[in-house]
Image (spheres, rainbow, N blue to C red):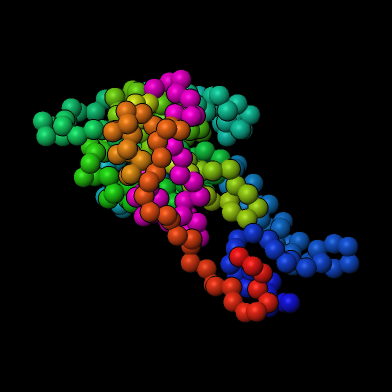
Amino acid sequence: MRDIWEAMRAATDYRVGIGRAGDSMTTDALLDLREAQARARDAVHLPLDVDALARQLAETGAAEPVVVHSRAASRAEFLRRPDRGRELATGIPRHPRPDADAQQMPRLGIVVADGLSTAAVSHHGAPMVRALTEELAGDFRIDPVVIAVQARVAIGDEIGAAMGLDEVIVLIGERPGLSVSDSLGAYLTHHPKPGTRDSQRNCVSNIRPGGLGYAPAAATLGRLAGGALVLGHSGVDLKDTGPAVGAPDRPALSGSGDPER
């Protein structure tokens, strides 16, 4: 029986078959749970290291990012007042007009927002920007990346409208759990503007090693971005019709005693 649980634990991030000591969990399982709780709290409360993220983005070959702040003046206020995380406190600098050839291409912007997990953005923000740039560069003129601090998803609407974008993708730290504390989400909005409803966006979530990889996530977003151009809007009417995304590499469950899959 022990071999079955070990195989299952190797195949998932979730806590299964942790055992017990009397009426409680084992000491090792309890310590592991407390460590996971600490990681989740840190992911939520620790501020984003903007300079480190900017250096990571520079290593991908991206132009110098634009840094903006929401109306939430602190991390504590951001957690208490979600509404202030959706609105800009700072303006967007003007960008030079594209040349004639670039004007023929739709404009797309990428916003990297700290959200509810600064760990997710620190670990996966830059490589996901690289994957998106490689996927979308042939079909869109991609504007300089915007780093948004103390920010929620909807801050991308105001940023996109101010920059005159056709589409915006917001990469944001998702709410951490006890199994995963650094999951990145991506939200696509066509013709972003303040007041856009959540039903007018498309979300790709659980972007991370062990979840949805950078390249498959970028490919999915590329299909959605192209589909939104054809459809004229994003949201619930826009479906990804691409190939199914495979599960992350995990040890296979084998043997006569394995549970049914």
Relative placement, left or right, of 10 versus 167 is right
Q: On screen, 23 above or below 236?
A: below
- Can residue 235 be seen here? The reply is yes
Kindly identify the residue that appears in the image at 66 percent across and 55 percent down: 36
62 lies left or right of 18: left
Q: Is residue 6 above or below residue 100?
A: below
Q: Residue 216 in the image: state x and y as whole percent.
A: 38, 54
Residue at the extreme right = 22
Q: Position of residue 174 (x, y in %)?
A: 54, 43
Please tell me whether residue 78 belongs to the stretch shown in magenta.
no
Q: Nearer the viewer, residue 150 or 139?
A: 139
The reply to whether residue 126 is visible in this rendering is no
Provide the residue span drawn in magenta: 193-221
Locate residue 220, reporting x and y percent.
38, 47
Q: Residue at x 36, y 40 (%)?
A: 224
Which residue is depicted at the point 40% across and 36% down? 238
Identify the residue at image location x=44%, y=42%: 186
Question: Looking at the image, is 206 positioned above or below residue 6?
Answer: above
Please identify the quadrant where the C terminus is shown.
Answer: bottom right
Q: Residue 121: horizontal and vertical position, in percent?
A: 47, 46
